[in-house]
Image: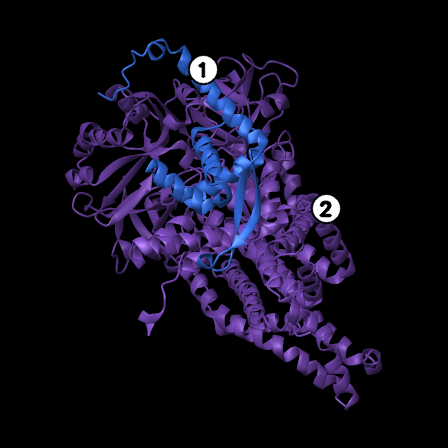
Chain colours: A blue, B purple
């Protein structure tokens, strides 16, 4: 069964893949995740999510080139599919629509907990 | 130098990673991790980077990254089918080996099944009472001046005292099975018929006893079946015999021709199940019964086993303690009034125990009681024998499988080469072993059910196979799997360890690799077998010793006629008529015979006038007649026999040597001893065995008396059948309505040691079985060895070896193993049997010839087994074996 709904972590990873473009491979994504969110994550966890997203059809991957710092091993580069893009957009639109229905937010009275 | 090396990811972590990671992910993952490592290294210390590497590796243990084991992808069912097919082909290709494997296994399993049935039956005793966990038998224990013991007989008023004084006791019931009072065997008939039938199994019992045991009723009301005087409860089988097709309740029966006091049948109960400790067919009520005046309130005689049922929630340990009050309240005053010396001390050296009813059958060691028992040691012994035989059978399986491994080695090599991994080869061999186990069980079940009647005879049981119990089937299924795996485990691991390269190159040392293990297992088999053989010999020696020991009386050619009390006053005439027969040497009337099952009593003896100062000597006091000593062939060592010419002999007594010794009478004849009254000692009879040879001969005294239930006849002629005919003819004359009932003294004597003889039979069967199974294995092993060395033998023959030298070559090896087994078995058997013999005060010696004989048998059987193969090997035409190369 293919899941179509995106989890929060999955959504972030998917976005990161988009941000990193040509350099989207497991190690790099994990690094980017840490620097963007400040949360640490293991490469294994990222890899596992990437595999799942690929199974769902949001990502595709192919082996890229090798570099010396990885002992001459090739990396697996992930790219977002059209379906992945569509799902991301749908997820964003869905949330925006929810925010818009939020009365206090719509009228600008929401205390966002900053002050 | 180390310092100059650049830091690198921990090797061990990489090893771990390699062990689980999917191979198609290896490159990218290793790359990512290594990149991560060097990036971390730039920011942090080497240790931190390495720790981080470990962290990352461990976090890769996720389902998506794990390597799936290979056979996961293979088709289970197909492989299983293949395993079965190959297993079956192997089985049918090597008929001899397969039949040894299966046959030996089946024998072992049959033995185990039978023994399991036996043990199940032994453990099932007395579990059928609805309130079984609240029913107890009262036991009295004493330790008085070094005399220790436990028994179950209590005074008649004891039950009432329990009931009155202890509210936590719900019911108390007694029975009396003593022949002194008319329990045991009697003549019985319906009141409306005239012919008596002799029946066993009479007891007296309280109405409450039946309620405690909750005996299931066929006719009548449990609450009111023995609550009136002169009532009787009979079992279903007896009801069917005397009142076929009727309801016997309310009908009358006459016991021992006492037609003035017939018994009314108060109820019919189901027969006691075979696994009940208590067995009887006729239960006479205790209501209104008094054996002598005031007997029911007399605290001086103990004749009643007493049972209680306690109320729910009673603390039994507490109750046991509280029961001691009975001694202080009732017994001590009685003893004091009787003027007993040391009454005070005696009262503090006895206590009560409550024995759960389910323990009576198996756990009554050391408790004297009137019911038959199983022996928990027998249960263990049987269990151990079963286990050993099964192990021997398993060893055959293991030995043959590993020995024949060379033949399977190529198959294993090929399977591995085409991609089979070790676990699937283990699976294959375990599957084969399960097939063997299944076939063996099927055969074993057949053998067991065929042998069951024989086994029943051996164990004195009436077991049936519980085919209709559903629990049997899952248990057997589990056993098939368990035993199949157990026997198959070692061969499976052994065979699956072959390296394909070596095997296919032909380098496997043809099955000789494990010769040591195999030899050890053979030694184990023969040690067990030879131990059993030695044990069998020693048991039979002891049986022989018992049966041929000089027992102090002449038990041969003595006919014991029972039930003569119905002759009443004619008995003396009957005896005289018998002695007139030319074939009869002498005859005597006495109920006391030196074999189990005849009358016994307990009496206290003193030297005259010393009853309040001396400690009493407990002993038997038998009532005999003038011809008793002559008929029994007993020997007077001093003094004289009773004589009809001496009128004073009614106050005379003859004692045995043990009595003289215990009473410390130096020159007994002419002295006076007493119990209730004083007697003149007129003779001393040589000690004779009147109890089991397990115990020492106790003190015994004999006086004149007339107990008329048994007439013993010493037959003089060798023509026993004509003597019997003439004796029967005389009996017919005196008692036309009652068939004669007789036995032979020597047979009854032998029956006392049935348990020993039974043990002998058990051991001989076990020894035979063990040796058969072990020899099956040896036979197959020797066949294998011959097969393996066939080329060597052929070459030897070509070079001029004789049949004898070939025979020696092949036999000596195995002979060595058997000799080692003998060396191990001798001390084990000696130790065990010495322990067993300690049970007997009178016992045979263990002599060295037993071991020699057992060893010789072991060697002989082993050589016989091997020689078939060895001789066959020596007689082949060498060309047959060599032409292939």
Q: Nearer the viewer, residue B377 or B701?
A: B377
Which chain is home to disc 1? Answer: A
Residue in the image at 62% along x and 41% along y: B477
Task: Tell me the quadrant of the picture where the N terminus of chain B can be found.
Answer: bottom left
Examine the rendered structure and indicate whether residue B650 appears above or below residue B772: above
Examine the rendered structure and indicate whether residue B870 appears above or below residue B109: below
Query: Mark 1 Cα within 10 Å, few/some/many (few <14, many 20+)?
Result: few
Helix, strand or loop at disc 2? helix
Query: Mark 2 Cα within 10 Å, few/some/many (few <14, many 20+)?
Result: few
Helix, strand or loop at disc 1? helix
Which residue is under mark 1?
Answer: A97
Please state the horizontal and vertical placement of residue B884, each as a whole percent of the image.
83, 78
Quote the CA–CA distance across marks 1 and 2.
57 Å
Q: Nearer the viewer, residue B751 or B434?
A: B434
Q: How many marks?
A: 2
Which residue is under mark 2?
Answer: B78
Please state the horizontal and vertical placement of residue A11, each as a whole percent of the image.
46, 30
Look at the image and tell me whether residue B441 can be seen: yes
Please state the horizontal and vertical placement of residue B674, each as a whole percent of the image.
26, 45
């Amino acid at each position: 069964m293919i899941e179509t709904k995106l989890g929060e972590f999955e959504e972030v990873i998917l976005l990161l893949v988009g941000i990193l473009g040509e350099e989207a491979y497991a190690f790099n994504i994990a690094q980017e995740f840490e620097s963007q969110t400040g949360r640490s994550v293991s490469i294994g966890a990222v890899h596992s999510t990437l595999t799942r997203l690929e199974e769902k059809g949001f990502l595709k991957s192919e082996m890229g080139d090798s570099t010396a710092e990885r002992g001459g091993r090739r990396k697996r580069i992930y790219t977002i599919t059209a379906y992945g893009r569509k799902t991301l957009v749908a997820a964003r639109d869905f949330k925006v629509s929810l925010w818009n229905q939020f009365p206090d937010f719509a009228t600008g009275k929401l205390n966002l907990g900053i002050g | 130098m180390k310092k100059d090396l650049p830091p690198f990811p921990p090797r061990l972590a990489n090893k771990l990673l390699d062990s689980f990671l999917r191979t198609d992910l290896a490159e990218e993952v290793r790359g990512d991790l290594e990149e991560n490592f060097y990036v971390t290294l730039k920011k942090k210390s080497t240790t931190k980077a390495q720790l981080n590497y470990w962290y990352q590796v461990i976090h890769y243990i996720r389902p998506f990254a794990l390597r799936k084991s290979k056979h996961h992808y293979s088709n289970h069912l197909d492989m299983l089918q293949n395993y079965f097919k190959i297993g079956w082909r192997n089985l049918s290709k090597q008929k001899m080996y397969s039949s040894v494997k299966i046959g030996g296994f089946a024998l072992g399993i049959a033995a185990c099944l039978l023994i399991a049935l036996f043990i199940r039956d032994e453990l099932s005793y007395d579990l059928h009472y609805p309130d079984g966990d609240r029913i107890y038998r009262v036991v009295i224990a004493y330790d008085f001046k070094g005399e220790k013991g436990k028994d179950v007989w209590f005074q008649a008023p004891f039950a009432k005292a329990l009931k009155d004084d202890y509210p936590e006791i719900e019911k108390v019931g007694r029975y009396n099975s003593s022949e002194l009072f008319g329990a045991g065997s009697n003549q019985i008939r319906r009141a409306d018929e005239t012919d008596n039938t002799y029946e066993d199994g009479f007891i007296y019992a309280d109405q409450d006893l039946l309620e405690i045991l909750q005996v299931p009723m066929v006719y009548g009301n449990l609450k009111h079946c023995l609550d009136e005087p002169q009532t009787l409860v009979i079992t279903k089988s007896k009801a069917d015999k005397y009142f076929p097709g009727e309801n016997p309740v309310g009908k009358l029966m006459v016991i021992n021709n006492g037609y003035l006091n017939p018994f009314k049948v108060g109820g019919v109960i189901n027969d006691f199940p075979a696994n009940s400790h208590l067995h009887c067919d006729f239960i006479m009520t205790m209501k209104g019964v008094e054996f002598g005046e005031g007997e029911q309130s007399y605290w001086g005689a103990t004749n009643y086993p007493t049972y209680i049922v306690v109320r729910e929630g009673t603390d039994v340990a507490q109750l046991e303690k509280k029961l001691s009050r009975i001694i202080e309240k009732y017994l001590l005053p009685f003893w004091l009034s009787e003027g007993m010396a040391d009454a005070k001390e005696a009262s503090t050296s006895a206590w009560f125990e409550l024995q759960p009813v389910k323990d009576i059958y198996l756990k009554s060691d050391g408790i004297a009681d009137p019911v038959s028992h199983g022996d928990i040691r027998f249960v263990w012994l049987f269990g151990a024998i079963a286990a050993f035989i099964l192990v021997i059978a398993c060893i055959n399986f293991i030995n043959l499988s590993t020995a024949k491994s060379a033949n399977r080695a190529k198959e294993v090599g090929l399977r591995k080469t085409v991609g089979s991994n070790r676990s699937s080869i283990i699976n294959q061999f375990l599957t084969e072993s399960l097939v063997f186990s299944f076939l063996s069980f099927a055969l074993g079940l057949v053998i067991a059910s065929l042998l069951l009647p024989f086994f029943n005879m051996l164990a004195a049981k009436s077991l049936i196979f519980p085919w209709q119990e559903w629990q049997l089937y899952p248990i057997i299924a589990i056993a098939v799997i368990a035993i199949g795996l157990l026997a198959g485990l070692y061969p499976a691991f052994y065979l699956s360890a072959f390296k394909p390269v070596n095997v296919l190159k032909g380098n496997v040392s043809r099955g000789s690799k494990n010769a040591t293990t195999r030899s050890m297992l053979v030694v184990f088999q023969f040690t067990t077998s030879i131990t059993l053989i030695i044990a069998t010999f020693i048991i039979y020696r002891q049986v022989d010793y018992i049966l041929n020991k000089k027992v102090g009386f002449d038990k041969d050619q003595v006919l014991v006629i029972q039930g003569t009390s119905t002759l009443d006053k004619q008995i003396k005439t009957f005896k005289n008529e018998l002695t007139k027969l030319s074939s009869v040497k002498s005859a005597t009337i006495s109920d006391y015979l030196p074999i189990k099952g005849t009358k016994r009593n307990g009496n206290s003896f003193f030297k005259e006038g010393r009853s309040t100062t001396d400690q009493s000597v407990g002993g038997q006091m038998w009532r005999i007649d003038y011809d008793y000593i002559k008929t029994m062939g007993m020997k007077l060592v001093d003094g004289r026999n009773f004589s009809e010419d001496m009128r004073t002999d009614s106050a005379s007594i003859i004692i045995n040597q043990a009595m003289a010794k215990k009473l410390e009478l130096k020159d007994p004849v002419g002295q006076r001893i007493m119990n209730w009254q004083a007697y003149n000692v007129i003779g001393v009879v040589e000690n004779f065995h009147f109890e089991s040879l397990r115990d020492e001969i106790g003190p015994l005294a004999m006086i004149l008396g007339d107990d008329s239930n048994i007439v013993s006849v010493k037959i003089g002629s060798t023509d026993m059948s004509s003597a019997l005919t003439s004796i029967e003819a005389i009996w017919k004359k005196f008692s036309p309505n009652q068939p004669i009932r007789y036995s032979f003294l020597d047979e009854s004597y032998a029956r006392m040691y049935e348990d020993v003889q039974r043990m002998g039979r058990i051991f001989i069967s076990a020894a035979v079985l063990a040796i058969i199974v072990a020899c099956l294995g040896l036979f197959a092993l020797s066949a294998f060895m011959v097969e393996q060395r066939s080329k060597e033998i052929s070459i030897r023959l070509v070079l001029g070896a004789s049949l004898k030298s070939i025979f020696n070559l092949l036999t000596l090896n195995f002979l060595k193993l058997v000799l080692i087994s003998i060396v191990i078995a001798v001390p084990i058997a000696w130790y065990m049997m010495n322990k067993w013999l300690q049970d007997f005060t009178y016992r045979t010696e263990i002599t060295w010839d037993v071991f020699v004989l057992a060893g010789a048998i072991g060697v002989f059987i082993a050589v016989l087994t091997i020689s078939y193969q060895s001789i066959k090997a020596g007689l082949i035409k060498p060309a047959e074996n060599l032409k292939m190369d």
